[in-house]
Image (cartoon, rainbow, N blue to C red):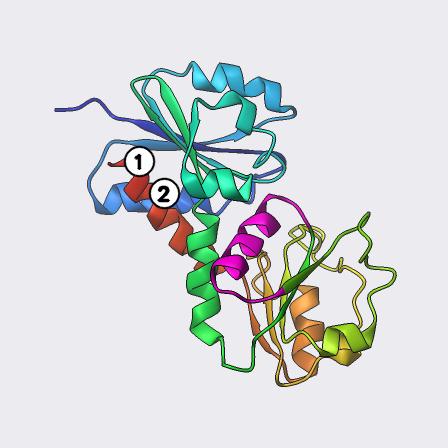
């Protein structure tokens, strides 16, 4: 019998993590003795001591380390190279390979609700999760614009007219995540309509302040839970190759 493996999540301020319960429940269902741990790192340099853990076989990576982790890996999958961010690490014989399963998860979420008239997009944020969303839109030939704090298009100059013309809105920042559930990025919600699809990648709380405001307009809304479940299942496949 193989010895139990150790998996885990690295991030910062991640006590609310979905992943630990999800994988612990999965191990129970599969009658595995594997364990899943949460590693709350104050600095990415602490990853070296995590990598030295005996029987460590895989990691999930979340905010703010999806891009910072890259120099610590031995190899990147093709999609991780193109995206420039990693959310899954598989460790085999000491070799650390980075993957991005956020892209798979987001694409499956998008296809749940996307209509033909959802043909252009606006991405709020430009971190690791946003880069996976950008990758999916490129693969699907959906033109997009990215709003970031320091970009030419930012939250201060985002106009209602600009939003009206882009029927998919994806909120990729951590603003509004538990426990700061009343926080919300500045956004011209009055420009939304029932023809808009609004996706917030946050899953805790299930309905963010951003989604509440978007829903008032009649826009179709979706949180990040389905995406998270789908990317987790893909991660499990990669860890068990």
| Mark 1 burial class by Cα count in 10 Å: few <14, some 14-19, many 20+ | some
Callout 1: SS: helix
Give the residue at the far right of this rendering: 156
**Would you say the residues marked 1 and 2 are in contact, meaning their CB atoms lie under 8 Å apart?**
yes
Image-quadrant location for residue 99:
top left
Callout 2: SS: helix
> In this image, 113 relative to 211: left or right?
left
Which residue is found at the position 28% from the left and 43% from the top?
Answer: 237
Find disc 2 in the rendering and name its residue: 235
Residue 69 drawn above or below residue 149 = above
Which residue is found at the position 44% from the left and 44% from the top?
Answer: 79
Q: Which one is nearer the viewer's eye here, 95 or 184?
A: 95
Q: Which one is nearer the viewer's eye here, 220 or 77?
A: 77
Find disc 1 in the rendering and name its residue: 239
Quadrant into which the C terminus falls: top left
**Mark pair 1, 2: CA separation:** 6 Å
| Mark 2 burial class by Cα count in 10 Å: few <14, some 14-19, many 20+ | many
Quadrant into which the N terminus falls: top left
Which residue is found at the position 81% from the left and 62% from the top?
Answer: 186
Q: Position of residue 21 (x, y in %)?
A: 41, 45
Residue 93 drawn above or below residue 82 = above
Any magenta on residue 73?
Answer: no
Q: What stretch is highlighted in magenta?
A: 126-143
Q: Which one is nearer the viewer's eye here, 53 or 152?
A: 152
Residue 104 drawn above or below residue 14 = below
């Amino acid at each position: 019998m193989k010895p139990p493996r150790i998996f885990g999540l690295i991030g910062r301020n991640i006590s609310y993590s979905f992943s630990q319960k999800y994988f612990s429940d999965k191990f129970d269902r599969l009658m595995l003795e594997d364990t899943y741990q949460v590693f709350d790192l104050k600095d990415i340099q602490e990853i070296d001591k995590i990598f030295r853990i005996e029987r460590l076989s895989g990691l999930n990576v979340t905010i703010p380390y999806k891009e910072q982790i890259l120099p610590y890996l031995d190899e990147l999958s093709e999609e991780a190279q193109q995206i420039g961010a990693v959310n899954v690490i598989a460790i085999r014989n000491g070799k650390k390979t980075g993957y991005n399963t956020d892209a798979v998860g987001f694409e499956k979420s998008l296809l749940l609700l996307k209509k033909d008239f959802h043909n252009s997009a606006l991405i709020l944020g430009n971190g690791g999760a946003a880069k996976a969303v950008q990758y999916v839109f490129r693969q699907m030939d959906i033109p997009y614009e990215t709003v970031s704090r320091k970009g030419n298009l930012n939250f201060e100059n985002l106009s209602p007219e600009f939003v009206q013309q882009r029927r998919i809105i994806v909120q990729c920042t951590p603003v509004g995540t538990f426990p700061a559930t009343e926080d919300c990025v500045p956004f011209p919600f009055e420009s939304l309509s029932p023809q808009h699809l609004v996706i917030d990648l946050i899953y805790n709380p299930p309905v963010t302040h951003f989604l509440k405001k978007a829903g008032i307009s009649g826009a179709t809304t979706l949180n990040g839970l389905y995406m998270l479940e789908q990317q987790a299942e893909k991660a499990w496949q990669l860890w068990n190759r």
